[in-house]
Image (cartoon, rainbow, N blue to C red):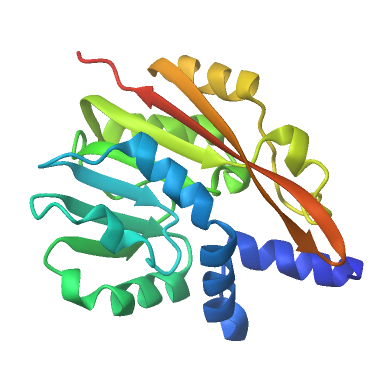
Amino acid sequence: MTEEELKGLAQLLRKPEGEYAVTMGEKMNEGNALLHERTFEVLNVQANDSLLEIGMGNGHFVPALLAEPSVTYHGCDYSEAMVEEARNNNVALADRATFQVADVHQLPLDDGAFTKAFTINTIYFWEHPQQVLQELYRVLAPGGMLVVALRPKDEMDHYPFVQYGFTSYSEERLTDLLTTQGFEHIQFTRAAEPSQEFNGVHLTLSSLVVNAQKAMV
């Protein structure tokens, strides 16, 4: 791919929009299926959980979280196109799943509104990660869980498009960020995934899932 094509891909991964938004949402579902599966294992949804997802894309995976009828879900995304897709894809769950366009740096949500918050493959794009984590801490209930899923830095740095607007994270950097914002009981789960081909090159993939807890008081 040319430099301009790589820049365009990076921008679409950051914020799917325009004529390729729907296609990009579908491709992200396919490429991140195992990452979602492992995130949901760590999230361990329980009865009466109120869930917040940052960057849910087209909402393809939302029904898997709402098998228990007492669970509620709210998704925020930077992309208007993805919010529209998510609503269309989850009409049958509209009484328990809501979606809105929002900037993660300033969430239009109440303090302590959620028992669990999670995000998958969005942390690379946070311009001010400390501020984002402050917001996520704020909207979690005391003792609430935050789960952040991503590709680890030692792999991300080899992907050809990450030089265009991505920030990669090591476990050490994540630990520092979470601890500084008051999160406790930080745990990491890393697992290998089958490699994926990109532009004729096979890329090594792993799931890195970190979970942390808001203080009880």
Q: Is residue 43 left or right of residue 22?
A: left
Measured from the top left, where is residue 110 in percent x and y?
A: 20, 42
Q: Residue at x 75, y 70 (%)?
A: 8
Measured from the top left, where is residue 190 in percent x and y?
A: 57, 31
The image shows residue 104, relative to residue 14, as above or below, that is above
Measured from the top left, where is residue 139 in percent x and y?
A: 27, 36
The image shows residue 187, relative to residue 62, as above or below, that is above
Q: Residue 135, can we see it?
A: no
Which residue is situated farthest in the bottom direction here?
19
Q: Residue 10, can we see it?
A: yes
Q: Is residue 72 left or right of residue 206?
A: left
Measured from the top left, where is residue 26 in percent x and y?
A: 53, 73
The image shows residue 83, relative to residue 154, as above or below, that is below
Q: Residue at x 35, y 71 (%)?
A: 86
- Image quarter for residue 55? bottom left
Between 117 and 138, the residue placed more toward the observer is: 117
Q: Quadrant of the C terminus?
A: top left
Q: Residue at x 39, y 67 (%)?
A: 60
Between 142 and 40, the residue placed more toward the observer is: 40
Number of on-image labels: 0
The image shows residue 22, relative to residue 158, as above or below, that is below
Q: Is residue 48 left or right of residue 194?
A: left
Q: Residue at x 40, y 30 (%)?
A: 134
Q: Quadrant of the N terminus?
A: bottom right
